[in-house]
Amino acid sequence: MATRTPRLACIEGGWDVNEPIVTGPLRTPLHIAAEDGHLGCLLRLLKAGADPRQLTTEGLDALELAVNKGHTQCFKPLVAAGAAPLD
């Protein structure tokens, strides 16, 4: 049996995937998945309607968080979902 992460459980529970998680700087589950390089979770969140353009309280979007950590596997899906390409 596969284990479910809290990020994926929020999708199945009908939560708003764009609602920030209040633990330090406000970040959505998509921000956390991008920053941690969790491609499977990121894809599920995007499919559930997560907004790749939403900013953290620090003014960063999910693509910038993925870029800052070198998670190249997250770049293409985020841009395809509408994240603004970086200069």
Image (tube, grey):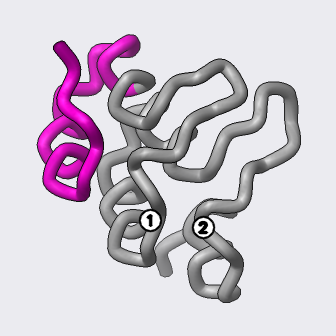
Please state the horizontal and vertical placement of residue 4, each as a whole percent of the image. 58, 69
Badge 1 crowding class, 10 Å Cα cut-off, few under 14, some 14 to 19, many 20 or more, is many
Residue at the spot of label 1: 45
- Does the magenta run of residues contain 75? yes
Please state the horizontal and vertical placement of residue 57, each as a whole percent of the image. 71, 28
Q: Which label's residue is closer to the chain start, 1 or 2?
A: 2
- Does the magenta run of residues contain 28? no
Name the residue: 19% across, 51% down. Answer: 77
Judged from the image, the secondary structure of the residue bearing numbered disc 2 is: loop
Q: Quadrant of residue 75?
A: top left
Residue at the spot of label 2: 17
Tell whether 68 sits left or right of 70: right
Q: Nearer the viewer, residue 3 or 7?
A: 7
For the record, the magenta segment spans 66-87
Please state the horizontal and vertical placement of residue 28, each as a whole percent of the image. 63, 48
Name the residue: 58% across, 23% down. Answer: 59
Tell whether 58 sits left or right of 47: right
Q: Nearer the viewer, residue 1 or 77?
A: 77
Name the residue: 44% across, 65% down. Answer: 45
Q: Nearer the viewer, residue 38 or 17?
A: 17
Height in image: 62 above or below 43? Answer: above
Where's the C terminus, which quadrant?
top left
Q: CA distance from mark 1 to mark 2?
A: 7 Å
Badge 2 crowding class, 10 Å Cα cut-off, few under 14, some 14 to 19, many 20 or more, is many
Given contact means CB atoms under 8 Å apart, are the residues at marks 1 and 2 in contact?
yes
Judged from the image, the secondary structure of the residue bearing numbered disc 1 is: helix
Residue type of the residue flagged with mark 2 = Val
Residue type of the residue flagged with mark 1 = Leu
